[in-house]
Amino acid sequence: MFDADDLLDLHPRRKFEQMLVTRCAAGDPFALMLVNLDHFKTVAAQHGANVADLLLFEVTARLRQRLSPRNVIMRCGDSQFAVLVPCLEDIENATQLASSLIERVEASMTVSGIRFRLTASVGISLFPRHGKDWKALLLSADTAAYDARTQGRGRISVSIPTVR
């Protein structure tokens, strides 16, 4: 089995975490988004690991199409991606970007002759509003992602402001 970073040519987790540390230390605003593919485990179980990997390739390509080169993307779980968006400090623009990511993931795709229509849920946290360090920010984004999934999937949830 491939390491997630090798499989999808994404930043390794340690490098991504270091980028978060550096961004927080610089004090410049940014957004952290966690994009969860809804019910992906079921799709992988039904169609096998090879098809699941091909779907992940396609989803990664689609996310990259919606992101600028200065945005950083990492796979942080079987069906979860983290996206760091520099200089994004307002909820409205973050929500618009998240909506465009969901829209791109939800567009029909054909892999190995099988047509799929995935959905995604996104949790958003903004630095420094939702966390003063990378761990608090990641926890805030994860909590928001969980809230998005429990609201019915295919949703966006923004972290509640806190001082962590």
Image (cartoon, grey):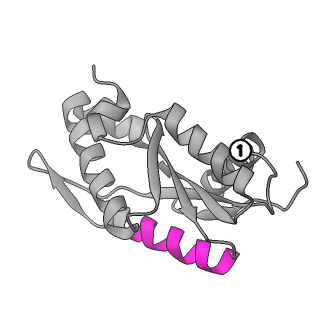
Q: Residue furthest left?
A: 113
The quadrant where residue 27 appears: bottom right
Magenta span has 94?
yes
Check disc 1 and report the residue beneath it.
Answer: 134
Horizontal and vertical percent position of residue 144: 70, 54
Q: Of 26 and 131, which appears nearest the observer?
A: 26
Horizontal and vertical percent position of residue 9: 30, 41
Side (left or right) of 97 relative to 157: left
Which residues lie in the magenta part?
91-103
Side (left or right) of 85 relative to 10: right
The quadrant where residue 32 appears: bottom right
Secondary structure of the residue carrying numbered label 1? helix
Which image quadrant: the N terminus? top left
Q: Residue furthest top?
A: 1
Q: Badge 1, how many Cα within 10 Å: few under 14, some, many 20+?
A: many
**Residue sitting at x 44%, y 73%:** 100
Residue 151 seen in this snapshot: yes
**Residue sitting at x 36%, y 42%:** 10
**Residue sitting at x 36%, y 31%:** 4
Side (left or right) of 133 relative to 155: right
The quadrant where residue 31 appears: bottom right
**Residue sitting at x 53%, y 41%:** 16
Which residue type carries mark 1? Trp
Up/down of 72 relative to 102, above or below: above
Q: Secondary structure of the magenta portion, mostly?
A: helix
Residue 152 seen in this snapshot: no
Q: Of 101 and 17, which appears nearest the observer?
A: 17
Horizontal and vertical percent position of residue 107: 30, 67
Horizontal and vertical percent position of residue 89: 68, 72
